Image (cartoon, rainbow, N blue to C red):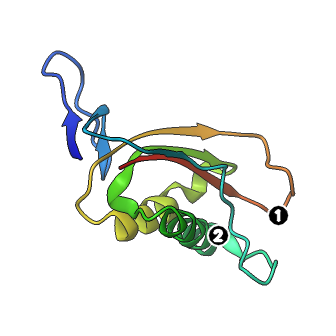
């Protein structure tokens, strides 16, 4: 599968790490749509704080993708639901660590809350392979 990030010259450049306006996935034969993943560890406990919850949510995504014989390299869309605007730097730090230099279309939505009040971030991805 070939992935090509979209960066049209006639729209604004977003100064966001790992961001692309879109992604063309050529030759993809399988698509995986993951439910929103939160910072819950395998033992059922919630991690403390945005950085730890974001890291765990990405680990959960990696586990789901691995189960589908995919990796973060296959991700073509990331949706982020974040409760607190002050947590954006922590989210971006972990996202940068997880994606490295990979580009990914994404949407960030600030929400009033998630299902459990101690959850502060939820990540949802679409992957193609």
Q: Badge 1: few (under 14), some or many (20 or more) residues near its Cα, within 10 Å? A: some
**Foreground residue among 58 and 34:** 34
Residue toward you, 12 or 71: 71
Based on the displayed image, in which of its 4 quarters is residue 117 positioned?
A: bottom right
Q: Earlier in the sequence, mark 2 or mark 1?
A: 2
According to the image, label 1 marks what residue? 118
Q: Is residue 82 above or below residue 101?
A: above
**Residue 71: horizontal and vertical position, in percent?**
39, 64
Query: Foreground: 27 or 96?
Result: 27
Q: Residue 114 location in percent, x, y?
A: 79, 49
- Where does residue 72 sit, x and y in percent of width and height? 39, 61
Return the x and y of residue 65 as percentages of the image width and height: 50, 62
Give residue 53's mark.
2
- The secondary structure type at the circle numbered 2 is helix
Name which quarter of the figure residue 54 lies in. bottom right
Name the residue at 72% across, 80% down.
Answer: 42
């Amino acid at each position: 599968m070939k992935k090509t990030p979209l960066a049209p010259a006639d729209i604004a450049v977003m100064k966001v790490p790992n961001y692309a306006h879109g992604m063309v996935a050529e030759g993809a034969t399988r698509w995986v749509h993951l439910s929103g993943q939160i910072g819950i560890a395998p033992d059922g406990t919630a991690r403390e704080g945005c950085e730890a919850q974001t890291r765990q949510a990405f680990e959960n995504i990696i586990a789901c993708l691995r189960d589908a014989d995919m990796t973060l390299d296959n991700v073509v869309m990331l949706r982020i639901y974040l409760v607190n605007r002050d947590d954006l730097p922590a989210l971006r730090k972990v996202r940068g660590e997880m994606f490295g230099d990979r580009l990914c279309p994404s949407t960030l939505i600030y929400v009033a809350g998630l299902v459990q009040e101690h959850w502060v971030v939820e990540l949802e991805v679409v992957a193609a392979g």
